[in-house]
Image (cartoon, grey):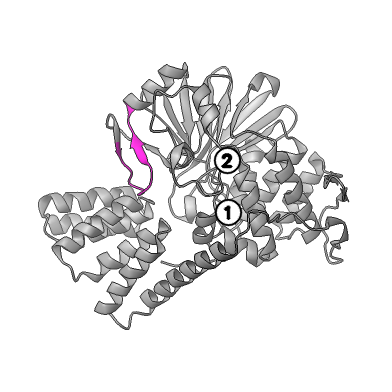
Amino acid sequence: MAEEAKLKGNKALQANQFLEAVDHYTEAIRLNDSNAIYYANRAQAEIKLEQYGAAIADCDKSLEVDPTYFKALYRRGVAKSMLLRYKEAYDDFAGVLKLKPSDANTKRLQNEMSKHMRRIAFEKAIQSEDEDVFDFDLEHIPLEQTYEGPKLDITFDKETRDVTLGGLTDSWMQELIKFYKDGGKLPRKYLYALLMKAHQVLKQEPAYKEIKTSEIGDFTVVGDVHGQYYDLINMFTKNGFVHEKHGYLFNGDLVDRGSWSVEVIVTLLFYKILYPDHLHINRGNHETDGMNKMFGFADEVKHKHGAKPLAMFQEIFTEMPLLTLINDDYLVMHGGLISNPTMTLAELKDKVTKLSNPREGVEMELLWSDPQEEEGFGTSKRGIAFQFGPDITRQFCDTNNLKAIIRSHEVRMGGYSEEHDGKCITVFSAPNYCDSTGNIGAVINFKDELEYFTFEAVEHPAVPPMAYTSQRF
């Protein structure tokens, strides 16, 4: 019976039905809890679900049953690497090589971990708090003669360092979108001007924002996009583009995974400059340096535009707000609630700050936490932050007179979900996530009541997710 459940799990895993696979492996473990393979197989499904903490725990259990089971060591190393725990991952891969000395893939991954450790040590040694990545003379960067996309009139004031993007209009944005969909690349002068200006604009925004939709018109909240440019444009086409009577809040994880992350963030930053009071962006856990180097954005930037813009993007990510209060009714953050559900919004507003790589405190919690069905707090399946139950959400919303919190951070097969008696809303806007999950995407339109608009994935050029990175597991 246990073996039959395992085989069902294997079939579900091969079909990318990862939640179903977890259920089958869990049933196999219930029937026989002394088989190392069952735990390691469930760990593989959990890795696919980005539940790295749960995967590590299952690999630990697998190795308790059979210390020589190399697949458990390998998968634990993969899960730890996803949490940026490179030294621990390196050690696990070393353990695999003791058991299988000629395994080329494990050798490659161990070398990748070694590179990450050396890079971190090097960056720490040379870092300077006084370094200004925007300290360059934009005026003397030439426009490539081969550029055939939409034109801008860039002006740069050397004294104030203010940048003006003349000619940036709605019609220019449509030309850019077509140019990008046809495979075009933005010239260096335009990219640097955009990043400098976007940094100036976002730096003026607080970590905790408050907006009123009555001052904007139509308003939409978007969940994770993850570099799926063609799906983003499809959503805009069907739901409406950003303009003076239609505002948007993008709730983080714009980049990584998908192979058009540059096009996504560049398009949204242009809209931010064109409509600074109508296009809003919350930071996600993937708008961070470590995640970008693991999940594709850093390598994509280098491939398309070289290494220099990457540091500019990181400065821009740091300046993104972490949470947004809409109409005094809905608090929107990427991950979820903080560990103190009695904290008032006034206290939270005073406490939250912009940090380069939040790994602790309320900043980390807002980026990483997840809801759970059980009451109280629980251990995170991700291996960072925690999970919070319906009672925690209820207490926080009651304390602050909120109708609900709105968060993203997790795939929902229907694009969205209402949990915790409707007080915890999840919206996810990357349909068929990573070209494999089969989910639909959704956004939330603010009308008299919240309305959910769902959409399917559309075709895109034959470029796989994370096409520009060496991270292959």
Task: Please say if 342 is above or below 56.
Answer: above
Find numbered disc 1 in the image and state the secondary structure of the residue it sits on.
Answer: loop
Task: Please say if 375 is above or below 19.
Answer: above
Q: Residues within 10 Å of mark 1 (few under 14, many from 20)?
A: few
Give the residue displayed 46% in from the left and 42% down from the top: 364
Q: Are marks 2 and 1 in contact (CB under 8 Å)?
A: no
The quadrant of the rendering that contains the N terminus is bottom left
Residue type, label 1: Glu
Q: Residues within 10 Å of mark 2 (few under 14, many from 20)?
A: some
Image: magenta residue range: 378-390
- Which is more N-terminal, label 1 or label 2? 2
Q: How far from the left and from the top, in percent, is residue 83?
A: 41, 55
| Quarter of image, res 129 | bottom right
Find numbered disc 2 in the image and state the secondary structure of the residue it sits on.
Answer: loop
Q: How far from the left and from the top, in percent, is residue 416?
A: 46, 35
Circle 2 sits on which residue? Answer: 354
Left or right placement of residue 150 versus residue 12 in this view: right
Residue type, label 2: Lys
- Front residue of 108/426: it is 108
Q: CA distance from mark 2 to mark 1?
A: 37 Å
Left or right placement of residue 209 versus residue 273 in this view: left
Task: Please say if 248 is above or below 231.
Answer: above
Give the residue displayed 11% in from the left and 58% down from the top: 34
Q: Check residue 389 for magenta coloring.
A: yes
Q: Check residue 240 for magenta coloring.
A: no
Q: How far from the left and from the top, in percent, is residue 422?
A: 40, 24
Give the residue displayed 44% in from the left and 72% down from the top: 114
- The answer to whether residue 137 is seen in the rendering is yes
Circle 1 sits on which residue? Answer: 459
- Front residue of 275/18: it is 275
- The answer to whether residue 257 is seen in the rendering is no
